[in-house]
Image (spheres, helix red, strand yellow):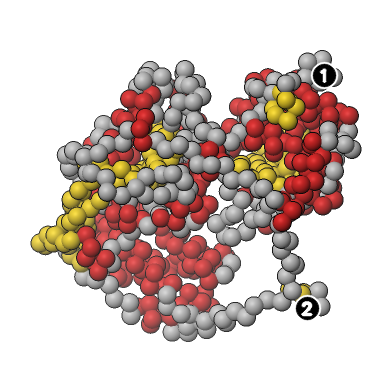
């Protein structure tokens, strides 16, 4: 996504140096309040951080000096790294709009309950305004003029329609304004029949969804200014918010300013792998094969097996828990470092939580879409537990704890899944970037976030986003030393000559329409799709990784001056296999088939109305090929386990057979 402020940068700097000519008097007064009394080009200590100050001033300039070009009608976007304090910028903008433009209503939209809870905590009782000293002494307003009203959840105050017509800060989940339901229609109607408002669209990378777009469009007529905030503007589907990005403060900038933790990635160096073969029909096992690491790809093992089969998972956890112990030594009893484990599905998450609890004796919280409100609340309050009352030391999640889940005590992240999305990958690493700023932890004290990865997950692209570099020829016995090995922060990237920026030309058009490139036509639906599917054959045996010899653990600091340290592999005692409950295995298999149906429809570009048809076909296929003709509920356990291990191979076969998905949809009911 392009920074559309760049071409105005020279003019903006001249505007600042000239005392902001053309700005409203209320704006000049508020800028003076936020600025350093000794240097009006810098923010006052304790108010805004330098990058927050920069983003605030650019919004002011865009709104008052370049409204038509930048701020109207779709608003502006601030791209600020996780831990960069987007909430404080929102709060400063709220006070400025009230004092300089007499805006009295402010609407905060968020994508989920976790983000909502985080915003509610910041704005409740005017906390963010008081903590930062954002309201000038003697101003015509106080923090009570920015009273918070939160939507739903049975909280005091609720969303009575009359409250939507009053002044103050209104916080709501975007789904509670969707017109597809009666409550959303009522909320939106009440909002649109009230005063004009400033709109803050937090975690805006979620917004290019049809209903979200429709809500923002409907709100446009009453919106004085829309400000989007995000740390990852590009979505997994390649789309971006329709607002204009006017400020970027990226991970490299935050590392340069020591505003976030330094991520350090740890991977095992593996020499040999031990494999066990299980008969898909009988469940019996045969000989073990030990092969060299370099030869293992010929077996076609899935990437997730390297972190979800029993022995590899336990080894990765041993590496992660070693990192937790190191973080506890750094914490010196001032806070409890948390291990955050990221799984790809509920079944893997259940297994991971059970392994940590039963084998490693680590108190672990499991958070999935099935978790209770109490468990989710505990997840957001993990860092507050500190050392007393046997606090949780680990939390396992299936992408439930992404944007908005901000627990600074997360010191170690264990990846038990492969990321194909740039957005999700960055969001997960972002959960560990926020610095601990309490308990006597110094502002200049070095802090790291240890990320335990596996080379077979092929996340090099993710680490490249953080500009990692590798130091070689380091001995196996060398250990990571924070004092000596934590690199100096990378230099800030600045725009020296904005006047040299080249404008991107508009796309070619023909009679007012875009000229589209030629695309290959979609495959013809297979009329004999059932014969093609029935003709699939699968190996008579499944392969399990039952041991691997780790020679060392490699760590890479993700900064421009990063290096790699090789340390001895941690001592590790293998535990017994951890089996998930039969009931959860069945539920996990059904859910995986439903999710697979979703992915097929998205891949082929079809409506979700065909989900039931695809699910039924998949269920029949798995029953015939892996479950000995039985239903999921009646199949033998080893057949269920075989089906689970083979699911990724089945998905790949179906996706790569031209016309098969299309045939299931077109001819599936014949």
Residue 638 percent location from the top left of the image: 23, 58
Task: Answer with the quarter of the image where residue 88 lies.
Answer: top right
As measured in the structure, the alpha-carbon distance from the residue carrying label 2 to the one carrying label 1 is 56 Å
Residue toward you, 612 or 375: 375
Determine which of the numbered discs, if any, sits on residue 352 in the image.
none
- Label 2 packing within 10 angstroms: few (<14), some (14-19), many (20+): few
Residue shown at the point (78%, 78%) measured from the top left: 510
The quadrant of the rendering that contains the N terminus is: bottom right
Identify whether 131 is placed above or below 497: above
When the figure is inspected, residue 496 is found, relative to residue 545, above or below; the finding is above
For disc 2, the marked residue is 510
Place of residue 610 in the rendered image (x, y in percent of width and height, measured from the top left): 54, 68
Residue at x-position 25% and y-position 51%: 269
Residue lying at 42% horizontally and 78% vertically, measured from the top left: 657
Quadrant position of residue 235: bottom right
SS class, disc 2: strand
Compare residues 617 and 280 and report the one nearer the observer.
280
Q: Label 1: few (<14), some or many (≥20) within 10 Å?
A: few
Q: How many marks?
A: 2
Q: Which residue is mark 1?
A: 139
Q: Is residue 660 visible?
A: yes
Q: Residue at x 41, y 19 (%)?
A: 334
x then y, percent, for residue 495: 66, 48
Q: Where residue 454 sits: x, y (%)?
A: 32, 51
User: On screen, 650 above or below 65?
Assistant: below
Figure check: 449 above or below 133: below
Q: Is residue 370 visible?
A: no
């Amino acid at each position: 996504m392009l920074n559309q402020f760049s071409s105005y940068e020279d003019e903006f700097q001249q505007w600042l140096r000239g005392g902001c000519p053309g700005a409203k008097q209320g704006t000049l007064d508020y800028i003076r309040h936020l600025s350093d009394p000794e240097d009006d080009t810098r923010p006052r200590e304790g108010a805004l951080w330098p990058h927050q100050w920069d983003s605030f001033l650019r919004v002011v300039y865009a709104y008052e000096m370049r409204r038509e070009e930048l701020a109207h009608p779709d608003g502006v976007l601030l791209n600020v790294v996780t831990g960069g304090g987007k909430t404080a910028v929102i709060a400063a903008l709220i006070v400025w709009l009230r004092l300089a433009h007499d805006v009295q209503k402010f609407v905060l939209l968020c994508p989920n309950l976790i983000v909502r809870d985080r915003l509610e905590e910041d704005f409740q009782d005017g906390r963010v305004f008081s903590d930062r000293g954002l309201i000038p002494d003697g101003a015509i307003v106080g923090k009570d003029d920015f009273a918070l009203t939160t939507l739903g959840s049975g909280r005091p105050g609720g969303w009575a329609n009359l409250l939507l017509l009053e002044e103050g800060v209104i916080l709501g989940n975007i789904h509670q304004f969707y017109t597809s339901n009666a409550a959303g229609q009522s909320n939106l109607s009440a909002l649109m029949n009230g005063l004009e408002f400033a709109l803050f669209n937090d975690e805006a990378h979620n917004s290019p969804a049809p209903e979200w777009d429709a809500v923002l469009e409907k709100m446009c007529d009453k919106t004085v200014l829309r400000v989007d905030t995000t740390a990852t503007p590009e979505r997994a589907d390649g789309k971006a918010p329709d607002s204009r990005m006017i400020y970027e403060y990226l991970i490299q900038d935050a590392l340069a300013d020591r505003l976030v933790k330094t991520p350090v990635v740890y991977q095992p160096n593996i020499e040999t792998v031990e494999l066990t073969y299980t008969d898909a029909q009988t469940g019996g096992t045969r000989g073990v094969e030990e092969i060299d690491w370099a030869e293992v790809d010929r077996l076609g093992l899935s990437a997730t097996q390297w972190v979800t089969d029993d022995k590899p998972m336990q080894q990765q956890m041993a590496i992660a828990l070693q990192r937790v112990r190191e973080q506890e030594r750094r914490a010196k009893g001032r806070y409890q470092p948390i291990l955050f484990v990221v799984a790809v599905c509920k079944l893997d998450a259940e297994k991971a939580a059970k392994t940590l609890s039963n084998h490693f004796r680590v108190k672990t919280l499991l958070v999935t879409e099935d978790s209770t409100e109490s468990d989710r609340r505990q997840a957001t309050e993990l860092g507050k537990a500190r050392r007393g009352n046997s606090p949780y030391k680990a939390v396992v999640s299936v992408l439930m704890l992404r944007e908005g889940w901000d627990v600074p005590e997360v010191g170690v992240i264990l990846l038990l899944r492969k990321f194909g999305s740039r957005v999700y990958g960055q969001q997960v690493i972002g959960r560990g970037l926020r610095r601990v700023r309490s308990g006597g932890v110094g502002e200049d004290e070095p802090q790291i976030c240890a990320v335990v990865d596996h080379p077979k997950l092929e996340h090099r692209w993710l680490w490249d986003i953080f500009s990692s570099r590798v130091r070689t020829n380091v001995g196996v016995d060398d250990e990571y030393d924070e004092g000596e090995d934590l690199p100096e922060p990378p230099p800030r990237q600045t725009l020296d000559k904005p006047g040299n920026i080249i404008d991107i030309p508009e796309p070619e058009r023909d009679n007012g329409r875009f000229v589209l490139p030629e695309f290959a036509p979609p495959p013809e639906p297979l009329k004999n799709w059932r014969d093609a599917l029935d003709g699939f054959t699968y190996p008579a045996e499944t392969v399990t990784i039952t041991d691997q010899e780790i020679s060392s653990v490699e760590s890479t600091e993700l900064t421009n001056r990063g290096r790699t340290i090789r340390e001895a592999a941690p001592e590790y005692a293998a535990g017994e296999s951890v089996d998930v409950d039969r009931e959860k295995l069945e539920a996990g298999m059904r859910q995986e088939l439903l999710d697979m149906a979703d992915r097929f429809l998205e891949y082929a570009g079809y409506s979700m109305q065909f989900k039931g048809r695809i699910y039924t076909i998949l269920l029949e296929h798995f029953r015939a090929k892996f479950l000995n003709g039985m239903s999921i509920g009646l199949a033998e356990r080893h057949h269920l386990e075989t089906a689970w291990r083979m699911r990724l191979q089945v998905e790949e076969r179906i996706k790569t057979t031209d016309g098969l998905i299309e045939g299931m949809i077109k001819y599936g009911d014949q």
